[in-house]
């Protein structure tokens, strides 16, 4: 099996970190998304959204969406569990994973795409939407800051796939000049903890 990805992009990194946490080796195929390699007929036929990453199994089955890929490996190799271990924890992981993905990673992505015009060959950038999305992303940092006052990780003492999503989103946010500030001491403490994990190098 192999994963088609782009080394510098945030979503593929979520999967690389997840697999590093699990100790799973993988073959990676680099696609140049800036040049639109992900959009060619071969990739589109395997992966309808054309987004990276996507996983290709040995029988040709393809799985897109970072969380779907992570879920597949969680089922194949449950240890260490990264999606929760009991009903409550699984729900909390799902809650924070979705919150971070929808209210932060997506906002950061929209701000990047609409303010830089990076993908202007395949979409129409709306700079005002880029500004609004950047503001939403920054506002959500305050929500996270409050939450992390009483929580070591997003789900209490439990490191999960939600933390991986947040780490990748925060690191990518630097590209649009969104950084943790003095008013985010708990997020900074969380960031230092999570980014010092060996997997963060993936
Ligand atoms: N919901 C998808 C998002 C994937 C995504 O947006 N990938 C970006 C790179 S981080 C991409 O492929 N961009 C290329 C394009 O839009 O053409 C996931 O979770 O994997």
Image (tube, grey):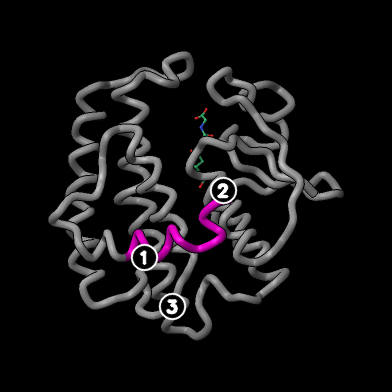
Of helix, strand and loop, which one carries label 3? loop
The residue sitting at 45% across, 72% down in the picture is: 159
Residue drawn at the location 71% of the way across and 31% of the way down = 45
Q: Is residue 148 visible?
A: yes
Name the disc covering residue 96, or none: 1
Question: Sequence order check: which comes first, mark 1 or mark 3?
Answer: 1
Query: What is the CA distance from the residue labelled 2 to the residue labelled 1?
Result: 17 Å
What is the crowding at mark 1: few (fewer than 14 residues within 10 Å), some, or many (at least 20)?
many
Label 1, label 3: how far apart the Cα atoms are: 12 Å
Question: In this orientation, which residue lies closer to the viewer: 166 or 83?
Answer: 166
Whether residues under marks 3 and 2 lie with C-beta atoms below 8 angstroms apart, the answer is no
Question: How far from the left and from the top, in percent, is residue 164?
Answer: 46, 59
Identify residue for label 2: 65
150 left or right, relative to 161: left
Name the residue located 44 percent from the left edge and 55 percent from the top edge. 165
Which range of residues does the magenta coloring cover?
Answer: 190-202
Q: Can you tell me whether the CB of the residue at mark 2 lies under 8 Å from the nearest atom of ligand 1?
A: yes
What is the distance, in whole Å, between disc 3 and disc 2 at their CAs?
23 Å
In this view, which residue lies farthest toward the left?
183
Residue at 39% x, 80% y: name it.
Answer: 157
Q: In the shown orientation, is residue 82 left or right of residue 40? A: left
Above/below status of 11 relative to 97: above
Question: Which residue was labeled with disc 3?
Answer: 158
- The mark nearer the N terminus, 3 or 2, is 2
Per the image, label 1 sits on a secondary structure element best described as: helix
């Amino acid at each position: 099996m192999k994963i088609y990805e782009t080394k510098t992009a945030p979503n593929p990194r979520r999967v690389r970190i997840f697999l590093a946490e699990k100790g799973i080796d993988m073959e990676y195929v680099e696609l140049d998304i800036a040049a639109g390699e992900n959009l060619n007929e071969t990739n589109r036929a395997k992966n309808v959204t054309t987004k990276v990453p996507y996983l290709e199994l040995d029988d040709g089955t393809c799985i897109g969406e970072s969380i779907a890929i992570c879920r597949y490996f969680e089922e194949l190799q449950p240890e260490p569990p990264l999606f929760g271990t009991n009903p409550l924890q699984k729900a909390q992981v799902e809650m924070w994973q979705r919150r971070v993905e929808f209210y932060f990673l997506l906002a950061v992505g929209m701000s990047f795409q609409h303010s830089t015009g990076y993908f202007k060959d395949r979409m129409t950038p709306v700079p005002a939407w880029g500004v609004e999305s950047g503001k939403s992303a920054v506002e959500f940092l305050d929500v996270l800051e409050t939450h992390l006052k009483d929580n070591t990780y997003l789900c209490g003492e439990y490191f999960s796939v939600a933390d991986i999503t947040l780490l990748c989103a925060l690191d990518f946010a630097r590209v649009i000049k969104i950084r943790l500030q003095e008013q985010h001491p708990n997020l900074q403490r969380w960031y230092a903890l999570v980014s010092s994990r060996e997997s963060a190098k993936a």
